[in-house]
Image (cartoon, grey):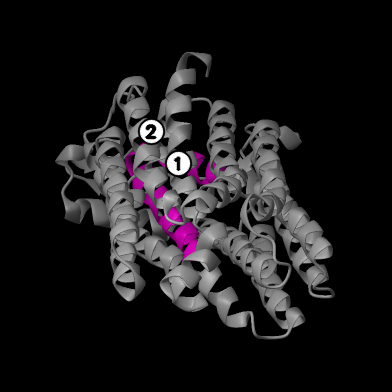
């Protein structure tokens, strides 16, 4: 992994910057609502529209990355993301009221198009770069840590920029994207592709993908849903804290950002440690993820008993640790279980599910804000419990023939028997 250190640094900048570009807005959403004169639900759409368009386009980006190469998709995607941020920044500066809101929304739409071909393609590219499972696991742990570190920094940075000028977080997006773009262009060396996916027709590609989903559907769909639930919990709770800290406790600016960063900092640390210590032990990944989902569920249930802010932040910090344990384990199980030819597409479907969680979290919580405190957190806990049950029963590491001992266990992955252009796969 040492020889690819700078490649990994460049790739880690992508989830960091994509997360900053989205999560920096969370602490200033109430401020945006006041400045533009829009409702809490309308302002939540600035997060949701970004995620929804990414959901629709991520599978296409995954297919294109399988066919033409990962880097060739990542570079234009970063440029599009920068352009979307620039549109929102100019609209916020030049316009006001509903006119500003809808143009900013359009910029966020464009930003979502770019995001579809950026972070989701990083996961399969890391899988392509390393042959050893342990290096893949550690590297994906670093990628997830970068992602979660972005979530830690974003509320502080977003709040600090918002104090200067309310739309300054929009201005920061194109600048950050250009930094990542330069790093990727000059530091990332794409591994040679042994397969010739560029000759595979769309029809053959769809047939192969369908076969993969048929053969491995049970554990694939489970991992997709678990990833979505983890991000639903993350962004739902962040939206709740952002609204409550400002409306009920009158916390603004950097102080509010620091409070939001507490659960995210522990999420970041847990993500790094999970990727580092599970290594190539797939049984350990399953049980680490199950422990994480259990911790998240319990923390949400307990949070329902009190709306006192110190108690809520404390419980959400435990929930953040749980989410941090889940994500790198799911990333590695998915990446290592898919042949390189299909890796971009399948991991893109997983990324789409994570974006579904991102898109649903803020609006669902905004609708539940008027309900009883216990009802809201009980509903979130029920969703997390589903993720825990899926981790326990649908993700099943099995021993290979001839293996013995806990460290030899891994998920059973079978190569799909599908037709290629010139015959059947071996």
Question: Mark 2–mark 1 contact, CB under 8 Å?
Answer: yes
Q: Secondary structure at mark 2?
A: helix
Mark 2 or mark 1: name the one nearer the start of the chain: 1
Q: Position of residue 94 (x, y in %)?
A: 28, 59
Q: Is residue 359 above or below residue 326?
A: below
Q: Position of residue 288 (x, y in %)?
A: 72, 47
Q: Is residue 37 above or below residue 23?
A: below
Q: Which mark is residue 17?
A: 1
Q: Which mark is residue 54?
A: none
Q: Is residue 363 above or below residue 110?
A: below
Would residue 269 appear left or right of 208 to someone viewing this image? right
| Mark 2 lies on residue | 180
Predominant SS of the magenta segment: helix
Q: Secondary structure at mark 1?
A: helix
Q: Position of residue 272 (x, y in %)?
A: 65, 36
Nearer-the-camera pick, 90 or 395: 90
Which residue appears at 47% of the width and 66% of the height?
32
Mark 2, other Cα within 10 Å: few <14 / some 14–19 / many ≥20: many
């Amino acid at each position: 992994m040492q020889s690819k250190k700078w490649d990994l640094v460049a790739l880690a900048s992508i989830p960091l910057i994509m997360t900053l570009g989205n999560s920096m807005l969370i602490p200033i959403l109430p401020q945006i609502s006041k400045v533009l004169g829009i409702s809490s639900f309308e302002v939540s759409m600035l997060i949701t529209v970004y995620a929804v368009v990414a959901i629709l386009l991520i599978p296409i980006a995954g297919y294109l990355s399988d066919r033409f190469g990962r880097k060739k998709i990542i570079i234009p995607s970063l440029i599009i993301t920068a352009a979307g941020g620039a549109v929102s920044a100019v609209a916020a500066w030049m316009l006001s009221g509903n006119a500003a809101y809808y143009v900013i929304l359009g910029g966020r739409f464009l930003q979502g198009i770019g995001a579809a071909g950026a972070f989701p393609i990083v996961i399969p590219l890391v899988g392509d770069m390393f042959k050893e499972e342990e290096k893949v696991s550690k590297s994906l742990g670093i990628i997830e840590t970068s992602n979660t570190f972005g979530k830690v920094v974003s509320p502080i940075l977003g709040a600090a920029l918002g104090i200067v000028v309310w739309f300054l977080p929009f201005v920061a997006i194109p600048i950050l994207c250009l930094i990542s773009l330069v790093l990727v262009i000059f530091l990332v060396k794409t591994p040679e592709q042994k397969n010739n996916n560029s000759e595979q027709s769309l029809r053959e590609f769809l047939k192969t993908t369908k076969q993969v989903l048929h053969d491995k559907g049970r554990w694939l769909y489970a991992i997709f849903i678990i990833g979505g639930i983890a991000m639903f919990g993350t962004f739902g709770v962040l939206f709740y804290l952002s609204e409550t800290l400002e409306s009920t406790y009158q916390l603004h600016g950097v102080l509010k950002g620091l409070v939001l960063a507490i659960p995210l900092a522990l999420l970041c640390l847990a993500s790094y440690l999970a990727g580092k210590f599970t290594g190539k032990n797939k049984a350990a990944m399953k049980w680490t993820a199950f422990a994480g989902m259990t911790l998240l569920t319990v923390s949400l249930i307990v949070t329902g008993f009190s709306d006192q802010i110190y108690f809520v932040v404390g419980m959400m910090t435990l929930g953040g640790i749980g989410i941090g344990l889940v994500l790198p384990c799911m990333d590695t199980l998915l990446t290592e279980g898919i042949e390189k030819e299909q890796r971009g597409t399948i991991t893109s479907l997983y990324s789409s599910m994570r974006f579904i969680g991102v898109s649903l979290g803020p609006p669902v919580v905004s609708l539940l804000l008027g309900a009883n405190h216990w009802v809201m957190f009980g509903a979130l806990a029920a969703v997390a419990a589903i993720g825990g049950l899926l981790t326990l029963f649908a993700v099943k590491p099995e021993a290979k023939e001839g293996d013995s001992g806990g460290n030899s266990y891994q998920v059973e992955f079978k190569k799909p028997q599908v037709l290629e252009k010139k015959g059947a796969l071996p």
